[in-house]
Amino acid sequence: MKDVTGEQPLLELKSLEKQFDLDQGFLETIKMRGGKFIREKRAVHAVNNVSLGVERGEALCVVGESGCGKSTVARLVAGLLAPTAGEIHYDGERIDNRSRRAMMPLRKKMQMIFQNPYASLNPRMTIQQTLEEPVKYHNPALSQGEIADKVTEVMQSVGVDPSWSRRYPHEFSGGQRQRIAIARALTVDPEFIIADEPISALDVSIQAQVLNLMLEAKDQRGLTYLFITHDLSVVQHFGTRVVVLYLGSICELADTATLFENPKHPYTRALLSAIPQLKDDKPNHIRLRGEIPTPINLPQGCPFQSRCAYANDRCGAEQPRPLQQPDGSMVACHAVEENRLDT
Amino acid sequence: MSTLSTNPEPSRLSRVWNSNMAYSFRQNPVAVVSMAIFLIITLAAILAPVFAPFDPYDPAQIDIMNSEYPPIWVDGSDAQFIFGTDDQGRDLWSTILYGTRLSLLIGLCAVALQAFLGISIGLIAGYVGGRLDSLLMRMADIQLSFSTLMVAIIFLAVTQAMFGSAAFNKYAVYFLIAVIGIAEWPQYARTVRATVLAEKKKEYVDSARVLGFGPLRIMVRHILPNSLSPIFVISTVQVANAIISEASLSFLGLGMPPSQPSLGSLISSGFDYIFSGSWWITAIPGIVLVVLVLVINLLGDWMRDVLNPKLYKG
Amino acid sequence: MSLLSVRDLTVKFAMRDQTVTALSQISFDLGKGERLGIVGESGAGKSITGFSLMNLLSRPGFIDSGKILFEGEDIVQMNEKQLRSIRGNRMAMIFQDPMVTLNPVLTIGQQMVETLMAHRSLSKSEAAHISVLKLREVYIPSPEERLNQYPHELSGGMRQRIIIAMALLLDPELIIADEPTTALDVTIQADIMELLLELCQSNKVGLILITHDLGVVSQMTERTLVMYAGRVIEAGRTREIINDPQHPYTQGLINALPQQTLPGHRLKQIPGNMPGLGALPPGCPFSPRCEYSVDRCRTTLPEIVQYAGIEVACHEVKRLHNADETQEQSA
């Protein structure tokens, strides 16, 4: 699958950082500490020093729990947010500092599918209007007939009955709306799709329909996916490679098969063991201490140290860097590096 | 793959009739009665030249000898004048019809002006955010800290002094529309901005941005149509307020001149005679004004109940 | 005698132009200390079942007919006062969003003490003491301090633990948990589920777990009801249902999970959507989506029949089973 070695990845994130300021006005930065007024700016460190590449034709999954920064990564790549530091390159060109107009050609190549199909369609536009708008906007030269043909073709390809086109989104179920949202993304013939938890708001039987649809689109159109999810069973099915994020930092990056057979980072192991299993009724998951700390003013050292059974002094002082393992995966953990884990 | 039954497309009319809003309207007798009264008053006002037996603007039809006839159900009335006549001998019924027309016209136009200013400013402030938002909203705060009437009184008094009474009277309608329109835009701007801030976070706006649409298109095509509910609600209240503002200003002698009376100036002109027994010159236009404002407010209340996103999930 | 016995429970919703049946003749039993899972997709009626059991339905929903016998007494016939003595006291409910149950302007301690004192004649300090014990039972660190904290000061997992502690406060005989962990992360979910299981087992509390997640049901419960469009379509021992589901819908639901298919291959999807309650097809509600449906399925509603130890509402269950066996033999 990856015979493209030597070629540059389709999407590359270089030391990407994103912080959200909590104290925005000047007055909010002034605080009382021990009887003294001090100026302090607090920030949420949503994404910290994330570097990764997405190869053409693959489905890279980003997993993690809430607050790990996975949606922020998606929004940074989509250009909905501007990074605090770092660079985003698409097809070899830097895109994070472009103006809206300069981004325009890219908008046809890169599209996004959102989590909540109840919010991602404009409630006041019919399905026809929703799907026509991007075609018209990006291809002003097309005639009305050509636009209609294009819309019908996309609708058929995602299993949306063209006779629904004059209805409004509220007349459809969640699964149907998500199909329509996917159809809208496909109207501009993209090559790269960012999918931010596209099935987590849907029922199980509908999840399968939408996942199948996305797999079909991948095969037929040669799409590349950046797939954000919290559901590891979906990752195992859909992803070619997986990135595990914790508190905005990469824990582990590996081929899907490698990750599921041989997870290395203590967090990845805990995450994998926590999936409720269907056929085996012995809950034997690795219990983590405590809960995810807030991403405000991160602690020094490894972000996972407060919940990790293997944490030692070094973990408290120094943040581990992702290191290449013999099987090709990248793991950011001192314990793995020092071979302290019992495997 | 599709299991959706292929019902025949419902017609636009039946869709409107079956909508939640039409249904709740039919279920609410207060709203139905208010709407009926509002429509009757509006129709009568629009068709004033048809219904009115006299033209109150035509001096040739006014005879000072007819002044202060009481309404026909009071002794000493004249059968020509249903509601009696005013101090100048004008038929009160005709004058009220024409006056209501003026009051409604000024109210609606002033609200249209408010809405235009307020919606544009609110959309921009909410969508762009940052410093521009702070600047525009501080302007709105400052504007709100002056009472509408105070601004209007100062403005109208100054213009009256500058242009002289004759010229002022000629353009009084425009001055009133402008001053009521400009004084109240912050109401709209604040409401629209709050709605825009809520809508802006929704994913359909993000998806429009990812599709590369420009800010103007996103604001007008995507956010504005989804912000209409609070705009409708506030509009009804504002029309009622504008009619009252106009009446108050006219009552104070800063609005419509007695030769071209609105409801407010009619009430005002009758006020001098109320103690000499001619109560009807003030009372009847007063009742019309109160009923008009009341039904508009009742309609506004009903609309707020229906469109309240917490009570009604669309 | 069983703890809870539901017989032909029918719940309707009076909508503006029609009355729709949200639950249709639900019947099941729950023994003391037994754990029952109610599984279904959104709109299947599983949450409405939970609310009905507490007689908590509000307009436009109402219990049309049927009995809910809680230790022999019919909850449907009870007045407000009798209900209050049962709700929270002998029967507790845990919701998906902890903030529904927790009052944001009162401290955890105030809320727990208030609940205790409303149902038991206890002094304030005794109530506080019991609260601390219960918080310790759900592994909340430094429980004395938590009593003085407000709900918003705690994390999501911590809040859900407190909800569980509050549900256990009056030593109820039955806990109804409606999607208790759906809003939580996987690692926290696993913790909370383990805790809930442990507490139910050690205190002999009955549990009705309402969820969409077959994996959770499989780990937590002894028996399972599968609901579809307001009906129970399959009921039996959880292990048997998971390992050998009889109803085509349950089979489809399990087969649709990504774990059941090789990575990268097409998932076995159930076509179509669940019908709306106002637009149920005649006959079996699942028939339009069912690959085994025959004419009879589209006209007559299937009765619940016993098959291989499982109660299942399907006309074609025998044919299905035979098909399975021939497949296995040929394989």
Image: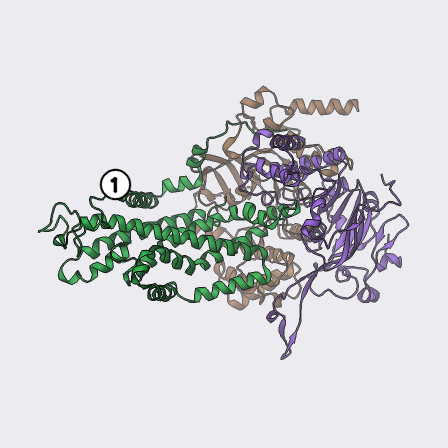
Chain colours: A purple, B green, C brown
As displayed, is residue C257 above or below residue C118?
A: above
Q: How crowded is the residue under tag 1: few (<14 C-alpha within 10 Å), some, or many (20+)?
A: few
| Left or right: A95 in relation to B190 | right
Measured as percent of width and height from the top left, residue A339 is found at 89, 57
Measured as percent of width and height from the top left, residue C219 is found at 69, 44
Q: Residue at x 54, y 22 (%)?
A: C299
* Picture quadrant of residue A320: bottom right
Q: Residue furthest right?
A: A326
Specify whether residue C170 is in view.
Answer: no
| Left or right: A230 in relation to A164 | right
Q: Quadrant of the N terminus of chain A?
A: top right
Camera-side residue of B203 and C101: B203
| Left or right: A307 in relation to B94 | right
| Left or right: B70 in relation to A292 | left
The residue pinned by badge 1 equals: B50
* Picture quadrant of residue A133: top right
Kind of residue sitting beneath label 1? Val
At numbered mark 1, what does the secondary structure look like: helix, strand or loop? helix
Measured as percent of width and height from the top left, residue A328 is found at 88, 48
Q: Residue furthest bottom?
A: A35
